[in-house]
Amino acid sequence: MIYLQILVNSILLGGMYAAIAVGFSLVWGVMNILNILHGTFLMLGGYLTFWLFHLYGVDPFLSLPLSAAAMFCLGYLIQLGIINQVIRASFFMTLVLTFGLELIAVKLALFFWTGDFRSVQTAYAGYSFEVGGVIIPLMRLALFALGLLLTGGLFWFMAATRTGRAIRAVRIDLEAAQLMGVSPAKIYAVTYGLSAGLAGAAGALVSAGFAISPVTDIEFLAKSFVICVIGGLGNITGALAGGLVLGLVENFGALYFGPGLQNALGYGVLLLVLFIRPTGLLGKAGYH
Amino acid sequence: MRAEVLLEGRGVTKRFGGLTAVSELDFELYRGEILGLIGPNGAGKTTLLDCLTGVEPPNEGAITFAGQSLIGLKPHQVVKRGIARTFQVVQPFPTLTVRDNVAMGALFGSTRAHKDVRRAQAVADEKLAFVGLANKADQPAAQLTLGERKRLELAKSLATEPELLLLDEVNAGLNPAEIETAIDLMRKIRNEGVTLLVIEHVMKVIMDLSDRVIVLHHGEKIAQGSPDEVTNDEGVIRAYLGEKYAKLLALGP
Amino acid sequence: MFPQWTKNQWLALWLGIAVLVALPQFTDNDGTRMWMDILMYMILAMSWNFIGGLTGYPSFAPAAFFGLGAYTTAILMNQGAPFLVAMPLGGVVGATVALLLGIPILRLRGHYFAIATYGVAEGLRELAENLEITGAADGINLPQIEGTVDYFTQYFYYSMLAVAVLTVLTMYWVTRHRLGYGLVAIRENEDAAGMLGVEATKFKITAFVLSGIFPAMAGGVYAYRAAFVEPIDVFDVLLSIEAIVMAMLGGVGTVMGPLLGALFLELINNFLWSQFLEFHSLFLGLLMVLVVIFTPRGVMAVVQEVRMKGGLRALGGILLANTQRFKV
């Protein structure tokens, strides 16, 4: 029986991880940028939701689109104004740049909001229901659903909309895309904004289902690394696959090795995948 | 007197998934000659070079150089056996000076293994003078023109002091004056005792320089012989220009 | 590419070392301690330079090696080993781990390599927090050094200085010999380097090992000085970040660059921000952003350009030009 519970937990966690990592995968796959700010967008989206609830009583599910939109705008501006200045430099330079921005952002967040963990305590936050002997907490289910929604939504966006196709074109062949009238600066900004928006959306529910604080921003980032490597890049469903695998590893790992070593196990799987199959489960060999 | 066979391939085959790039190729290369390798685009010429230099190990077949097998060697090992190669798309070390670029060849690829940095730079200066780039020795390689980069590539390969030099379309993108210079340079190299295998699309180079020519088409050897023999071969004409022209030319002037 | 040093430059080096050796006589214990920290960061930045600067494989592993050295020293000293045995053995452990790890990890390139090294550093921290042999999250105490405050402050200082001098001399030797050239070739174009005969795998692993020994030894000195090690302290990824930023600040891939970058950054940290200690990482972040946008090849490169273009008036133009180079 316990195995079933753990399996369900893993799947739910997998969906949540997908929600967290899908934006990271987008930016890495399209622009070859390791966005160290990713966790920050998540955290900021969560804080927005938190303050809206705390000050005005806005339900997190309602403020979710707001968090997403706000983060989209922030991301768009950051890419347009800052990252685009050095985007043609080596990947290492952009890595250091986003790292620097993250350090600044986290420090400011700590200064204004302190390191206290915040979570949105709605009436239904602790609610869970039981199906066939397995306990399913409501917020976990919501995050799982969000993961599917965001992944599916992004997939649709990339396939069906003009902007989405422009983004794919830029990824495949920048010069050709430019010849077709696509402005790389704007596309990069939209892509980055999208990724930030996705992170913000995830953050909104994370603050409701769990807790957020400036100090956890690196954790989300690290998880995103691991998930994207395991799942592979260049493929939206990679985040889902990676999230699922990580969820399984962590939950079953906790069963056999104890909860403390969960993170270490995650890093172990990361290294294993990198050594054996760097493109990940579903990845296409692209940037390597 | 029959010259010595320096490089020999038997049944060399290279497949990429469903595509056979090189198919059951037999060839010999004699020491001291200039062998031209021609064929339409996609004929497998560069792939053959990749097989020779360990970049893409062949699926089947044997390749021997000076009596020893090259199969299974990695590129850096092939260089040390005495085979150097240039690339169609030149690959300099961009931020390093021209001299340092060439010195790398002397430091690492030379069969005489110059381990000393100063020695290697002296060899580099020699080779730069040989190709006519001595005045650019201190410039960063990224600042050279295309023609100069091709000569730099040549100098780098020469710095490894090879017995056999594989040239992959050195003349692509050069103007007629530059091509003449290149032809002279290649003759000078052969006179220094280096054997040359030259892949070219610029027919003038092939006609002027080659002792013998091999023609590849769809990975197979379709003709071999002197430049005149090969350019008049019906199969070769058909491969390059198509059935219509082959028939036309067969009808005579 | 790396010209032999002139007599004057050698003189400057020996003079610098002499000054550092005499330093404790001219300053108090606080000053000595500050300079010990500066030396420690110099070691980290220079060691990173072997793999990150010369070879072009940006590694987040310095913290990993630092922690390995610290813990090795702690564990060995608790078994009764004297410091002067434990610390070098820490270096050996660092080198060995770098060798074993290097074989799989150096097959990766770019982002994947960076992430893998980050995974190693963080993974080791997580392990240290959970294993008994490392005392888990509580850490390990080391035997206290005996003697007066003056004595042991200088003892630690000279130990760190010894490691630093070793690092500089190794860096110099590498860049004047074949190994240095090979590493730079790999950085510039790894495939072309292979085609010219560079045994990339061997060279990369050597660089990685060199990037591991010295931080490990520095970690050992740090451990003995603190008399205590805990995971969050010695396996701190921020150490890797700072090493990278210092190298970038001074000039990646040069010999003196990382050294000067470390000196510069640490002096600023100590003098300007001693009141604002909590803003240390904010300042670091700001610096990272500014360096990438305005001085991507480091302050040394800007200084050279200023000299070439005839003075400080050209500075604005140079910085502006740097921002345009990598724009979209």
Image (spheres, grey):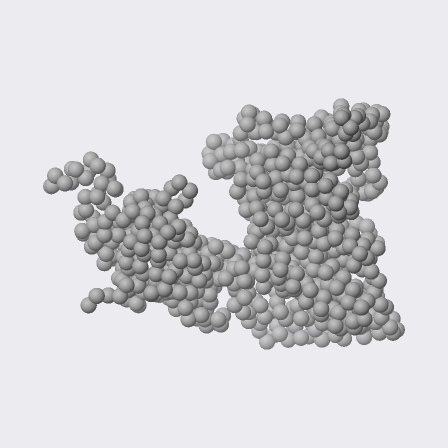
Q: Quadrant of the N terminus of chain A?
A: top right
Instruction: Name the outermost residue toward the right.
Output: C148
Which residue is found at the position 54% from the left and 69% from the top? C177
Which residue is found at the position 31% from the left and 43% from the top? B218
Q: Is residue B165 left or right of residue C48?
A: left
Residue B61 vertical placement versus C91 (above, below): above
Nearest the eye: C99 or A69 = C99
Nearest the eye: B196 or C103 = C103
Q: How many marks?
A: 0
Residue A25 vertical placement versus C193 (above, below): above
Which residue is found at the position 87% from the left and 74% from the top? C147
Where is residue C326? Give x, y as percent. Answer: 56, 46
Which residue is found at the position 42% from the left and 56% from the top? B54
Instruction: Work out whether residue C138 can be spotted.
Output: yes
Q: Is residue C174 left or right of residue C264?
A: left
Where is residue A218? Give x, y as percent. Answer: 73, 44
- Image quarter of residue C154: bottom right
Nearest the eye: C183 or B1 = B1
Where is residue C211? Give x, y as percent. Answer: 64, 62
- Image quarter of residue C175: bottom right
Instruction: Work out whether residue C43 can be spotted.
Output: no
Residue C287 vertical placement versus A121 (above, below): below
Where is residue A51? Give x, y as percent. Answer: 81, 31
